[in-house]
């Protein structure tokens, strides 16, 4: 059986993107061309790969088994291409990074500024989303690497490189600082309105774990997607906020916010780089990772 590699590749893209239209966009070809390629592959194989439903397309049982083998092959080709490109210079290229707005501003920016000075012709694109959404984009090949708060839920197909340690704290404006005298025990948190990020962010999950560990049952008064808006709400007096100390040092120094120390203290955590475990990043992304981790070695 002599089947064109492009048919395998198109099949792979349809599966990982979950639709013919999205695969067509990713491959920069028309939807009819993708549909015809799938039809040609099914004819060559002598069986159906997909079931068409009103909700979209689903792999058949035999299509699912087939995909497991095709996935390994396509990713091996991609790794080979990336390994080859690793020997080329950085006169062009792009890096697609996934991170929250806060991590981009406070952690990623100094590294990409340094990289840009060395390699100004490489395009750098940042996508700001929740970690769960970024992981999906990484798997689909829409991102090259992520920089996220740790810990994160274990994933079999990704590897994590710890980048730096950060410290979460409780903070308030001057009024809440006076109410608490700047020091409380964990159970006292139930007496005050809490302002924090919305689930399922890693930061919120870390807070939830701390509250559960200390048997604190409290209602989150304000759940907010953006960590910067959490700080704005705390400054406005909506309650005690949960934030990362390293990201609000200027506000603490200028006394726009006050740290409210809690016993037991909140464990230290890390920010890390996330890569697909069995993929070799493109050369530009690999060089950025080297810059980000050189101080860690």
Image (tube, grey):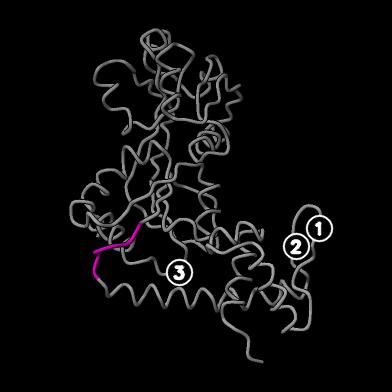
Cα–Cα gap, marks 2 and 1: 7 Å
Secondary element at tag 3? loop
Residue receiving disc 3: 279
Percent of width and height locating residue 150:
44, 46
Stretch in magenta: 89-94
Label 3 crowd bin: few (<14), some (14–19), many (20+), radius 10 Å: some
268 vs 193, left or right, is: left
Name the residue nearer the viewer: 33 or 240.
33
> What crowding class fits label 1: few (fewer than 14 Cα within 10 Å), some (14-19), or many (20 or more)?
few
What distance separates the C-alpha of mark 2 from that of mark 3?
26 Å
Q: Is the N terminus in the top left, top right, bottom left or bottom right quadrant?
A: bottom right
Mark found first going from the N terminus, 2 or 3: 2
Instruction: Specify whether 164 is left or right of 71.
Output: left
Residue displayed at 66% across by 73% down: 37
Nearer to me, 50 or 65: 50
Q: What element carries label 2?
A: strand
State the separation of the CA atoms marked 3 and 1: 32 Å
In the image, residue 45 lies at what x, y percent?
73, 83
**Residue 230 as seen in the image, left or right of residue 174:** right
Residue shown at the point (32%, 62%) measured from the top left: 93
Q: Mark 1 points at which residue?
A: 53
């Amino acid at each position: 059986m002599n089947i064109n590699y492009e048919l395998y590749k198109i099949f792979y893209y349809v599966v990982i993107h979950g639709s013919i239209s999205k695969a067509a966009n990713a491959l920069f070809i028309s939807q009819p061309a993708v549909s015809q390629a799938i039809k040609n592959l099914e004819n060559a194989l002598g069986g159906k790969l997909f079931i068409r439903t009103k909700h979209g397309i689903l792999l058949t049982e035999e299509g699912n088994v087939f995909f497991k083998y095709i996935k390994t092959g396509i990713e091996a080709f991609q790794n080979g291409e990336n390994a080859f490109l690793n020997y080329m210079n950085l006169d062009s290229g792009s890096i697609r990074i996934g991170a929250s707005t806060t991590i981009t501003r406070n952690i990623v920016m100094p590294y990409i500024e340094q990289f840009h000075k060395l390699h100004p012709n490489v395009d750098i694109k940042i996508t700001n989303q929740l970690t769960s959404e970024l992981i999906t984009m990484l798997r689909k090949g829409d991102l090259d690497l992520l920089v996220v708060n740790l810990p994160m839920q274990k994933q079999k197909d990704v590897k994590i490189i710890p980048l730096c340690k950060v410290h979460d704290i409780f903070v308030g404006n001057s009024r809440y600082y006076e109410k608490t005298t700047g020091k409380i025990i964990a159970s006292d948190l139930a007496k005050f309105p809490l302002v924090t990020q919305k689930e399922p962010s890693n930061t919120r999950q870390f807070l939830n774990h701390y509250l559960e560990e200390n048997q604190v049952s409290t209602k989150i008064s304000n759940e907010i997607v953006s960590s910067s808006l959490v700080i704005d709400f705390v400054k406005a007096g909506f309650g005690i906020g949960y934030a990362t100390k390293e990201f609000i040092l200027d506000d603490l120094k200028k006394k726009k916010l006050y740290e409210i120390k809690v016993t037991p203290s909140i464990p230290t955590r890390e920010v890390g780089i996330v890569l697909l475990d069995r993929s070799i990043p493109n050369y530009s992304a690999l060089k950025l990772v080297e810059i980000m981790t050189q101080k860690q070695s």
